[in-house]
Structures are given as C-alpha cells and as structure tokens.
Image: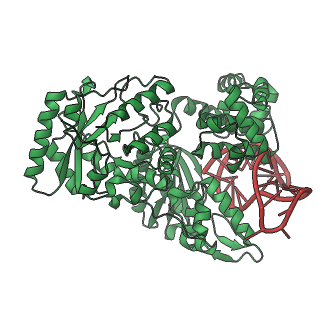
Amino acid sequence: MDNLTMARLLEQTADLLEIDGADGFRIRSYRNAAEAIAQTTADLAAICDDTAKLLEIPGIGKSMATNVKALVCTGTTPLRDQLLAKYTVSILELTRLPGMGPKTIALFWSAAQINSIDTLAVAIEAGKLADLPRMGAKQIEKIKKGIDDYRRSSGRFRIDQAQEAAEALTKYLLSFAGFDRVTPAGSLRRGRETAGDLDLLVTGPACQPDQTGPGVDYVAAYPGIADLIVKGENKVSFHLANGMQVDVRLLPGESYGAALQYFTGSKAHNVTLRQRALKMGYTLSEWSLARLDDESVVAAATEEEIYAALGMDWIPPELRENLGEIDAAVNRSLPRLIEERDIRGDVHMHTHETDGRNSIREMAEAAIACGYEYIAITDHSKALAMTNGLDEARALAHIQRIREVERELEGRVRIFTGIEVDILADGALDMDDEVLAQMDVVIASIHSRFDQSREETTARVLRAFENPNVRILGHPTGRQILRREPVALDMALILRRAAELGVAVEHNASPERLDLCDRDLRLAKELGCRIVINTDAHEIRTLGKMSFGVRQLRRAWLGPQDVLNTLPAAEFVSSLRTRPQTTA
DNA sequence: GCCGTTTTCGGCCCGACTGTTTTCAGTCG
C-alpha cells in the first residue's frame, strides 16, 4: 500500500469518527497523521515494522503506528472496519455536498437512515427531511442544488485554469475605482498543482469597514458568475460557469497582510503559526497579530511585519505546508529557492516534424524571446505513430536541420540535438543506439502500457537506465493531472538508481503534468538526483509555461544549485550523464 | 490520539456567514 492510499484511509476514518460524534481532538489526530503520511518522503510500507522510524514522523504516535502496520498488512484498521460496518462507505460522499457537515449527516442518518447521495435525493423528494430540526425550505433547497452541482462537476481544477480565472477576475475588479489591489491567496498563491476554489483578496478605499456596499455590489455583478452563493459585508462567493468556486474578500489596507497570511494557508501552517503566537503572548487572526493581554495590534498591514514580529523570516508561500518551514524561518535557515530567471535553457520541446506545431526556427526564436541561452529539440520516436514519430533515418536528417538552424541564428542561442525516445513495454528503447549516441540530449519517456504492475514498470525503467545513451528520464510517472493517474513505480528505487548512474530526472513543467510532483522532487533531492525542468512545449505559446513548474520546484525546497538547466550551456552538457568512451 | 521551553496530564487556532433557534448551532475556510 502506498502512502497516499494510507493517508486517504486515515482521512476517511476521521470523517467517519466525526459523523459518529467522536472526540474532536482524536479526530484531528487522525487528520494530522493522514497529512503527515501524505507528505513524508519515507515509504511507510517498507518501514512499517520499524516502530522507531514511524514514531519519528511528527503526528504519528504509538497507536497511529499500529494503524499504519494494520493498513500495510490488512489494507484496513479495526476501527475503520467497525465504522464502515455501521455507516457504509457511501455515507462519506455526503461530506462533499456544501452545507453538509458531520452533524447534519449524523442527523439524517439517525432520522432517516440516509447513507449516500442517492438515498438523500430520494428522501428529499419524499419530503422526509422537512420535519427535522433546523431544516427549513431554504436549507433543503440548498442541499438539492448541491446534489445537482456535485453530479455535474469534479470539484478540483488545474492550477493554470485557476490562474486564468484569477487573471480575468483581477482585470474586472481593478476597473472599479474603489479597488486598487487584488491578490490571489490560497492554493494558487502556494503554487499547488490543483485548486479547489479561488480566493481573491481586494483592498482599496471601497474596502473600508461600513463602506463596502458598492464594492460588494460590483463584485457580485461580475459577468462570469453562474450563481451567487454568499454576499456578505466583506465577502462575495460564487460559482463560475465551469463550476469553480470563487471567494472574493474586501479588506481594509491596515489588515491586508494578516488577511493575506491567513487566506494563503495552508491550514496546517496557520495552525502551527497561531500556536507559536499564543506561546509568545499574541493571538493571530485574519485581522491582525495582537497582544493577548491588552488586545493592542502588533502587526497587520504586511506579511513581513507579522512574520518578523513572530521572530522569523518571511516564508515564501510555496513552502507554507508545515513541513519544517517554520523552524527554518525561526533559525534564519530558509533556503534560497529557485526562480524562473535562474533557468537558462529548456531542453524538452517538439516541432512540426512530429506532433509540435512550429518549426525548429520558430521554437528557437521564441526561446530567445524567453531569454534562454540554450534549448534542445526533442521530437518523438517512431513508436508514437500518432505523432508521426521519427525513425532512425528521419532522426539523423532532423539532427542536420537542427544544426543548420543553430548556424543560421549565429550564436544567439545554443540548440542541442535530441530526442524523446519511447521506453517500450519491456524497457528497450525505440531507436538504435548508434543514432542515439549522436544526440546531445536523449530523454527516455513512457507513453504506453500505463497498466503494467508496479514491478513491471519499475523494471522497465531500470532497464532503460542501463542504456548509456539515456541522459534524462522524461515525465517519470506519466500522470496527467485530473485525467490520468501516475503509473505505479517504486519511486525511491528508480531515483536511487538514477542518482547512481547520473541520469537526470525531469520535472515536466506543463501544467497538465507537473511530473515529478513536489513530494517526489523532495525525495529526488534527498537521494542526490540531478533534476532538469522542461516545458515539453508543443508550440511557441507553451514555451512560456515554465513558471508553473518552477513553483513545484520551490514547493520541493529546491534552489538553483539543485537544477541542471540553471547552468550555462557548456556546463549543462558536461554535467549530464557521461557516456562510456566508445572503443570503436 | 498526540505531545512536552511551565505539562507524562491536560491541553490542543480563529472569525464570518447563514438560516432559523429570539441568542446560537453548524459549516466553512
């Protein structure tokens, strides 16, 4: 069982405990443990017999360690089985409906044996809920609508979709005279790979207390609103047509920093920060950091002031996941994180020779416009027939054209020759070695047979590594965010072997992939792997999407020294895997 | 159920909004 599955089962147990009316702190400890397990780079299935190692993970105590062992050995825990026997697993989907919390679910279950969205829908139609306490016509209408929405939408959105929505809204909001600053908070600001909703903070003269009426009305008049959820004094919530929920908050400038800090999260980061505030005699809210004794404000206008007053450096939003960043900020030892301008080259892109849309020359010109010193042209190999992948003869001709374009551009950009060669189902590469040996950048990627077992896929990748021409493992898990699950891989084993051989692993910055994910990137660094970040652009427009990947690298605590393509061209090539000298 | 710079017992983060309950519970973030 992998860590994420384990985390999901513990999270599920917490939900069931909550419906069951268990002690709130016990519930929280299950959630904390789930979070810790989802984030750790240790492979719990591998170390589950080593209780001491389990206890090293913050949030895992004696009885949670027992739970972990039970999950690995039996796939469940006694407590979970007991709760599921009472409620059935389908009751959990009720928590996905807006306005349905554990108390309401428990009420419905005890009053009408409702344990799924379907039985809830039937009960509403039969009018069974009308007599229950706190169930007025509005409440029931809200639940009905929630069921319809749930059945239509998946709930989460890719980060680029969230950003696009944020940019459109920001433009609209800034055209109102009383607003002068709009900042996205939440998952988008932290650079997560998906967002469940969009949080926008707004400040300006129209956001002063008791004067927010016109501003709120303006927000609520946004033409993109599909339906309005909440319209309060300083908050407007609504859905966009694609189902994305947006929360817009109007805030006075003097508490903007406190609000930005609060609504950026993560929740776990904020909880830890607040505990620290309390120990220091302060209380931290979305309005201010204030003294506990006389309630006087210590800091509120900027995040920098608040973190400084708490005795620590300002923490970049990407790190705010309660994974050690608070201690590091207190000790003044936060890392210098990589920035987009550190990236000197993009070495994974396609042209119209296969499934790209632009020529070598067009891609190169666009890369120059991005400020890159070098690129690599890495079209597909023949196994990807639908992309018109290259066979050996075409690949050799392509190399010649790449060199010609490089000469034409007269030193304005270095263009490496390359290929994204398929790793076939058995781990062999889809191109002759003597052709691969002529290329600067050979990226090996999986594009087929995603259904193989963990053992098969791991062996497949390890066999590909044995080919000395392989210099980079492309989009290692093959996942497509919200569309296709990652392939099953023994990631620690793969990364350890890559580190030994000097094979670099790619972070594919395309917002559809973001592969490796942040957690595996941290593991890669721990294991001494070299990392390369690429856009995998198929047209000039997507060359500009490097920033989505950079945010994932930052989330993994990576600095420029951890990423090969922050190096100048010559050093970049010489730090790729060195091939054995050919004897011929 | 976890944890320890006052604690191995007794703590464990804070406020807005909604609906319906005339004083507040539940949900959400």
Judged left or right of residue A93, residue A387 is left
Judge whether A170 appears above or below A445 on screen: below
- Chain A colour in the picture: green
Q: Residue A83 versus residue A472: which sits nearer the camera? A: A472
Quarter of the image where one finds residue A233: bottom right
Question: Residue A68's spot in the image, x, y percent?
Answer: 70, 36
Residue occupying the point 45% across, 64% down: A336
Residue occupying the point 59% across, 39% down: A43
Quarter of the image where one finds residue A64: top right
Judged left or right of residue A74, residue A341 is left
The chosen color scheme is by chain
Judged left or right of residue A306, residue A534 is left
Q: Kindly indicate which chain is depicted in red in the rendered structure.
A: B
Question: Which quarter of the rendering shows the C terminus of chain A?
Answer: top left
Q: Residue A412 versus residue A247: which sits nearer the camera? A: A412
**Is residue A163 at all visible to an observer of this figure?**
yes
